[in-house]
Image (tube, rainbow, N blue to C red):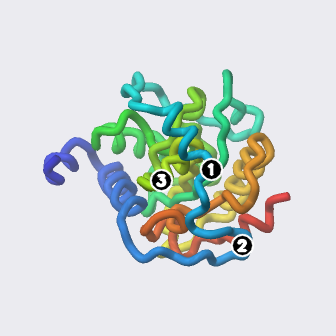
Amino acid sequence: MDRRKFFKMLSGAAVTAAGIALNGCQKAGLVREPVTPYFGPRHGPGPYAEASQRAGGSRPPSEPTQVARASSGGLWTPPGPERAWRYIVLHHSATDHGSADVFDRLHRSAGWDELGYHFVIGNGTESGNGAVEIGSRWPKQKHGAHCKVSSHPEYNDVGIGVCLVGNFDQSRPSDAQVAACVRLVQFLKDRYGVPESRIYGHGQLKPTHCPGALFPYNEVFRGLT
């Protein structure tokens, strides 16, 4: 799609936030080496790739759904059968502002079936500072669309995408965002038995600057038990 036509589809602040969100998080750049001892190799053996490919196949687009919001772990529990999640992938939006609704509209406008992330953590602009927004994929326990690596489909198929609003190449996330990220990751880690060695920043799995040079990996991991 012609970029000028695409940006005409969005309006006001959403254009700036959403446009950078799509290009900033996904844009290829220097692969950042792990900055914390908690991470394992950037590319693991991919033990779930074969099973994911067998179970996945082609997937029809989902019906549009509203983005739900929640601020407590109890509401993060899916309402039905749960996917065998094995990874947690952390992102930034590469924007100064935004929300799950904004990014959902952007992703749909770009031809995606819905918001690619499972969760978005607001920064106080278009959603609350530290507010955890639940994307439409999560209640359906649907595969992610946030970390496409052709040799490792499991990063999307059984990887939970968590996006913090902000550009962390320019500034660090707010204290409220970091605290919310710790709470959410702790909940997901405990519920699905995800080891710390499978909690990654996006740029540790593919060539991208996401989630930014100033993302506080050590602070997040220190908060986990």
Circle 3 crowding by C-alpha within 10 Å: few under 14, some 14–19, many from 20: many
Q: Is residue 97 left or right of residue 133?
A: left
Residue at 60%, 45% in the rendered image: 48
Q: Amino acid at mark 2?
A: Asn
Residue 218 - label: 2
| x, y percent for residue 206 | 46, 64
Q: Is residue 2 left or right of residue 187?
A: left
How many dots with numbers? 3
| x, y percent for residue 105 | 36, 39
Q: Which residue is mark 1?
A: 47
Is 174 situated above or below 67?
below
Q: Which residue is mark 3?
A: 147
Q: Secondary structure at mark 2?
A: helix
Q: Earlier in the sequence, mark 2 or mark 1?
A: 1
Mark 2 and mark 1: Cα distance apart in space = 27 Å
Is 82 situated above or below 165?
above
Residue 157 visible within the image: yes
| x, y percent for residue 97 | 45, 56
Mark 3 and mark 1: Cα distance apart in space = 17 Å
Q: Earlier in the sequence, mark 3 or mark 1?
A: 1
Quarter of the picture holding the C terminus: bottom right
Of circles 2 and 1, which is in front?
A: 1
Q: Is residue 118 left or right of residue 146?
A: right
